[in-house]
Amino acid sequence: MRFLLVMCLAIAALFCSGHSLAQEDPLFKTYNRDIDKYSFTKNFILSISYYKRVADRLKVEEALKLDGTSDIKVIQKFINDRTLDNTELRIARNYLIKFTSSRNGLIQQVARQSISAYDGVLALSMRERELWQSLSRFKLTGEPEDFNEKDFIEQQLSIAAQKKEADKMLLSASMLIRIVLLSAERCGSEVCQELALSRDERFKLTGYLDDFSRDNLEWGIKPGQTPIEGCVAAIREVLEDEQVFISKDK
């Protein structure tokens, strides 16, 4: 796995320095073979769509937290939201499981990294639900008597910080999608065919993005974007930029 990670970094460096160099490099051809690329990218986008639902709920909750956590109905909403999170995080990871054994080594790496991020958020979400359930019992019954609201808040802040780290893992995985989509085949004509996708496939994948995220962002990752927006913008940049990425005509 360490060797594969080093390989990913090497490919990334080649990608930044020029696509033709990446296509000539033997590591690129060995570990980023033109296998599973459309199917994997489709499933990755669909998995992100479920993770976006989790992120959207958290965004709504931030406004509710400003009003305090004394309202039992608000507390119950947080408990219910974490239950929904758990379901959708499992769906998100399930879209990628089969690709952990892909014959494309880079796809394997991206799938495993994304699943690790989802699993991390899932564990944190389950822990957070337990905390809200404890607060709910305390508000309703006064039990447990040793419940400490200051400790509750500190644990919530710790969970939020750890979720941000998981978001970074997912964002870096989406950046590797840009490299996954490069064709391992050497350009065979003056009109360089650099992506392992047809124009029709790119159009379909863009449609999957549009289904859950409006096309209102500049391409590429920009300051101030949420991790989900960054994932979408990075992938959209590859799929829509006809001037840089020329697809294979099939």
Image (cartoon, helix red, strand yellow):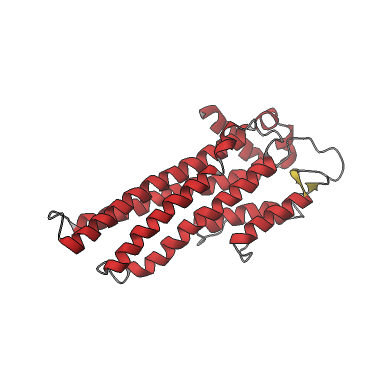
Q: Left or right: 153 with respect to 77?
A: left
Residue depicted at x 47% and y 40%: 116
Front one among 71 and 41: 71
Q: Dividing the image into 4 quarters, which one contains the C terminus? A: top right
Q: Is residue 218 above or below residue 3?
A: below
Can the viewer see residue 158 in this picture? no
| Residue drawn at x 36%, y 54% as measured from the top left | 160
* Residue drawn at x 70%, y 36% as measured from the top left: 22
Q: Is residue 183 left or right of residue 107?
A: right
Quarter of the rendering containing residue 211: bottom right
Q: Farthest residue to the right: give it.
A: 190
Q: Residue 122, position in %: x, y? A: 41, 47
Position of residue 74 measured from the top left corner of the image (x, y, whole percent): 32, 67
Give whichever of 183, 190 is nearer the camera: 183
Q: Position of residue 206 (x, y in %)?
A: 68, 56
- Seen from the viewer's position, the closer of residues 138 and 227 is 138
At 71% from the left and 54% from the top, the residue drawn is: 204
**Camera sees residue 31:** yes
